Image: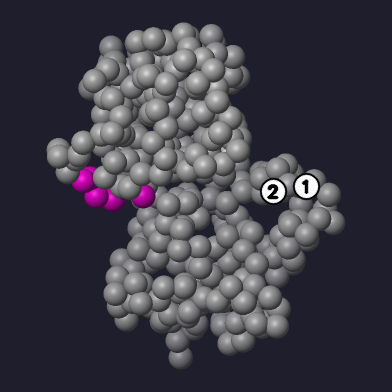
């Protein structure tokens, strides 16, 4: 008799976000595999779109926001419940085995370090349920153990894959923003932990470059960056695109002179992998998980003084472009090491181990 697995994937509705990307890419990876005797159910609001993409490979459960409340929890008892996000409030009413995937526990630092706070209590309850835990980086595992008493159960680090599986033809793409001079690029949600303001400040003394930043800048931190740009007369050199589609993202990644990602809290960090897939030099913060992503051939900032950041950037660009063929090859090779089919196969192996 087939064993049943429930993937709590309702974050699929926001594919522009990191969790939405994770959910969709994990499902696409599993789709390519022989699922043995497993009957896998996906939880999503738009099950018709999933069914059109994946057909009968999976079963589908329609997500309702009410299911976050105990009275309306999913009632069917599955052999394995996979909570693919450490913060989701969607939980089973009954469960046999429970797999928890941890992306980060930044909420301890950003929301509350009080272990009685609701967000920490929610996570502790997940830890109590867990039969096994997967982490998306060694840093995520280390951070979890730093703040929580983790039960003595199997733990696995499974790296995410590169979300760019197809290189798009950007020949006819027309940028709304100037690309007639060398530019630096970055993409991500405009949150303080992304630390985009540090590279904007660096731009004051980098007149030879423009900077293009993509992502949802409709938040307080985005407004702070906009104000800084105006106050320092950078409007003609620093450009905020807002959210972009895959075509625009790949255009800017393929045309940029370098990719900059100074995030100070990152459970994994997909954008640097995307940039490396295009053979670009990547300049990263040396904090949290980013050294695991960039490896030894990326360039790192260990603090964010603008003059220092400029020096690291210029030295790195000189090194990269004086050895361009070799460095481009190393970047692409590094990106290729992050593969979603490989990651999905590792998750499938964990499923089978849990289910015996």
In the rendering, at what x and y percent does residue 227 appear? Answer: 55, 25
Q: Per the image, is 167 magenta?
A: yes
Q: Is residue 289 visible?
A: no
Residue 330: quadrant of the picture: top left
In the rendering, at what x and y percent does residue 278 appear? Answer: 28, 34
Residue bounds of the magenta highlight: 163-168
Residue position marked by numbered label 1 in the rendering = 112
Q: The residue tagged with tag 2: helix, strand or loop?
A: helix
Q: Are marks 2 and 1 in contact (CB under 8 Å)?
A: yes
Q: Is residue 215 left or right of residue 289?
A: left
- Which callout, 2 or 1, points at the residue further toward the start of the chain? 2
Instruction: Tell which of 211 and 39 is nearer to you.
Output: 211
Q: Residue furthest left?
A: 171
Q: Is residue 347 left or right of residue 129?
A: left
Q: Residue at x 30, y 70 (%)?
A: 53
Dominant secondary structure (helix, strand or loop) of the stretch shown in magenta:
loop
Q: Is residue 93 visible?
A: yes
Compared to 23, does 90 lie above or below? below
Mark 2 Cα-neighbour bin, 10 Å: few <14, some 14–19, many ≥20: few
Q: Residue at x 45, y 63 (%)?
A: 13
Compared to 55, does 132 lie above or below? above
In the rendering, at what x and y percent does residue 336 appear? Answer: 32, 42
Residue position marked by numbered label 2 in the rendering = 107
Q: Residue at x 39, y 10 (%)?
A: 207
In the rendering, at what x and y percent does residue 213 appear? Answer: 42, 32
């Amino acid at each position: 008799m087939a064993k049943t697995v429930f993937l709590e994937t309702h974050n699929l509705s926001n594919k522009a976000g990191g969790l939405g990307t994770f959910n969709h890419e994990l499902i696409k990876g599993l789709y390519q595999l022989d699922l043995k005797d497993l009957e896998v159910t996906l939880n999503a609001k738009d099950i018709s779109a999933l069914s059109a993409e994946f057909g009968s490979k999976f079963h589908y459960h329609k997500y309702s926001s009410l299911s976050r409340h105990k009275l309306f929890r999913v009632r069917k008892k599955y052999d394995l419940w996979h909570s693919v996000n450490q913060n989701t409030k969607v939980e089973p009413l009954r469960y046999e085995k429970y797999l928890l995937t941890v992306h980060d526990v930044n909420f301890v630092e950003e929301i509350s370090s009080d272990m009685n706070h609701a967000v920490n209590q929610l996570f502790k309850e997940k830890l109590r349920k867990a039969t096994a835990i997967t982490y998306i980086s060694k840093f995520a595992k280390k951070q979890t153990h730093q703040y929580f008493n983790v039960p003595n159960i199997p733990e696995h680090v499974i790296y995410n894959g590169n979300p760019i599986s197809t290189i798009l033809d950007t020949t006819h793409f027309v940028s709304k923003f100037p690309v007639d001079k060398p530019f630096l690029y970055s993409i991500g949600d405009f949150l303080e932990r992304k630390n985009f303001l540090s590279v904007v400040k660096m731009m004051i003394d980098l007149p030879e470059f423009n900077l293009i930043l993509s992502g949802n800048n409709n938040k307080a931190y985005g407004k702070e960056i906009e104000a800084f740009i105006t106050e320092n007369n950078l409007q003609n050199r620093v450009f905020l695109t807002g959210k972009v589609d895959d075509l625009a993202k790949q255009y800017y990644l393929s045309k940029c002179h370098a990719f900059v990602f100074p995030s100070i809290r990152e459970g994994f960090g997909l954008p640097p992998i995307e940039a490396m897939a295009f053979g670009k030099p990547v300049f990263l913060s040396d904090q949290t998980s980013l050294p695991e992503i960039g490896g030894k051939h990326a360039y790192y900032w260990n603090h964010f003084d603008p003059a220092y950041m400029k020096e690291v950037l210029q030295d790195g660009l000189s090194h990269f472009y004086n050895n361009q063929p070799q460095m481009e090859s190393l970047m692409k090779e590094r990106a290729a090491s992050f593969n979603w089919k490989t990651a999905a196969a590792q998750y499938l192996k964990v499923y089978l181990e849990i289910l015996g």
